Amino acid sequence: MKREDAKIEQTWDISLIYKSVGEYEQQLERYKDLILKFIENYKGKINSLEILKSSIRDMIEFSEIASKISHYATLPVEANTFDEEAENRANDLNQIFAEYGAMLSFYESEILELDTKILEEAKKEKDFKVFIEDILEQKAHTLSPDVEKALKSLSPILNSPYRLYGETKFKDIAFPDFEANGEKHSLSYNKFEGSLEYSKNTEIRRNAFEAFSNTLRKYENTTASVYNTQVQKEKIISKLRGYDSVFDYLLSSQKVSKELYNRQMDIIMEELAPHMRKYASILKRVHKLDTIKYSDLKMEVDPDYSKKVSYEEAEKYVLEGLSILGDDYLAIMKEAFENRWIDYVDSEGKSTGAFCASPYGTNSYILMSFNENMSDVMTLAHELGHAGHFQLTHKHQSILNSEPSMYFVESPSTTNELIVENHLLNVAEKDNDLRMKRWVLSQMVAKTYYHNFVTHLLEAYYQREVYKLVDEGRQVNAKILNKIFRETLEKFWGDAVELVEGSELTWMRQPHYYMGLYPYTYSAGLTIGTQVSKKIRAEGKEVANKWKEVLKLGGSKSPQELAQLAGVDVSTDAPLKDTVAYIGSLISEIEEISVKLGEI
């Protein structure tokens, strides 16, 4: 479906940010004027506590405008990469941000020259604390003003790998039709990842994977070259800034130690792998397959039970499940459905996957493709978790305190997923419906945990191996990347799953590699989310209210502190090990019910 043919209620309403392009352009001019005034008022003049405070307040003003104009310009491109007018607007804005960002490069350097007593006094003000602490933490890695200005000026070029990846993925790759069961089937990124890889028909599922992979392979060298540019850029910047390794550089903004980072991957690789091999065996036995292939891993345990779910039914499931979080939280969810925060139409040129964007001071925006699968319900709950989080954060924190660490950011979203799934599990247990119970359990394993603890974890494990090579001064190409990803899959799945041709190309499908050390944070967030959702299920509204208070804190606390306030101590490996064991228990329940139903 072309974007212009979509029903308006299935698309998001960008006019909630600005009513027109004209209003956007007025705010863009205001943004530029405020920065020029800022430079005039403060460059070379930040020499007292009063002036420092005044400058931060003025910075907050233009930062809030920047958040809105940025989202107004870029969100339409995510919804339709063929929209040339929107793309030109976004590109123009990126150039303006680079130009004006370079003009502001003096600011942090001048702050670092202030007496420590002034900075300590300024930190006492709630809205300034995190901003100043972050600057002080980066002091040893801050370059001369001229170099910082040059880097800011080069930002459109330095950020080009992500843009080039998207250009290749959404504009250049054209998938052919494929044949299965004597019929032709159309293929696209969204169709494959949204429905075909879940198909209960083995020939459709496997042939779709083959056609999809064969097409990806034609672009492996271009994609690998773009990715190599990204990781080499990160290594060069890490050296320029005096970091010992690219890992130290990328983890610094997350406020996470290498111990926490490595623990997440090492424990899951060793302790979750046996459980997931057991799950693969269950799929093989239930579906009476001679062998379980990599292209089979996304199929449902009981696809005939998993009926189609309308968008209206999905809304009902989500609102009923999340009602435990209280009327105030539910009001945010209802507003999202009623006021077109969600773009769920499956249209040409739309970005794959799903995300939630939250401009400061306005509503959130969710992009996804709704294919009437139960997995879409969980995606909806997940992204609404981000929306609820940032709506609460923005209401209680300044823009300078609004961004939590990547390590924590997936906790609210995955908590929502599990709350909705546990709601459905309660319904099944109340009705003593074994088949429904197995279906819900399989949704938890195959969707929530597979996505965050398997898909993204394997990406993260692979990514770590890539950065190890980069730290050694090595370049990477398609052959090397394919080898690393295949070895990662072999380590996790062992001989339980047949890794068919094309499995090694999975690294080509995700944009997360252009966002630093992002993939591992999904499992980190879900570890916290699992513990919180279990507490909410056991203790009810008291824990739910406590959780909402944590969500209001945004980035004003470290990820470890936020987790601790939610009752989860990530300073030890206990929450992670407990979560892995919990996943194992879900898989064992699926097996037990399948035996009772006489299917294995």
Image (cartoon, grey):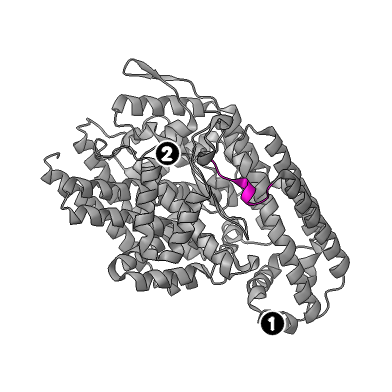
Q: Residue at x 24, y 54 (%)?
A: 427
Question: Which residues lie in the magenta part?
Answer: 11-19
What residue occupies the far top of the structure in this picture? Answer: 182
Residues under numbered marks 2 and 1 in contact, where contact means CB atoms less than 8 Å apart: no
Per the rendering, the mark at residue 566 is: none
Q: Which residue is mark 1?
A: 120
- Provide residue 250's location: percent of width, then percent of height: 59, 57
Kind of element beneath mark 1: helix
Q: Is residue 262 above or below residue 289?
A: below
Q: Nearer the viewer, residue 504 or 46?
A: 46
Side of 89 where 510 appears, left or right: left
> Dot 2: few (<14), some (14–19), or many (≥20) neighbours within 10 Å?
many
Per the rendering, the mark at residue 486 is: 2
Main SS of residues in magenta = loop
Kind of element beneath mark 2: helix
Q: Is residue 18 above or below residue 291?
A: below
Side of 244 where 207 appears, left or right: left
Q: Amino acid at mark 1?
A: Glu
- Provide residue 532's location: percent of width, then percent of height: 37, 66
> Dot 1: few (<14), some (14–19), or many (≥20) neighbours within 10 Å?
some
Quadrant in which residue 114 is drawn: bottom right
Q: Residue at x 20, y 52 (%)?
A: 589
Q: Nearer the viewer, residue 174 or 577?
A: 174
Does 485 appear in magenta? Answer: no
Does 16 appear in magenta? Answer: yes
Q: Nearer the viewer, residue 586 or 537?
A: 537
Q: Amino acid at mark 2?
A: Arg
Q: Alpha-carbon distance for marks 2 and 1?
A: 51 Å
Quarter of the image containing the C terminus? Answer: top left
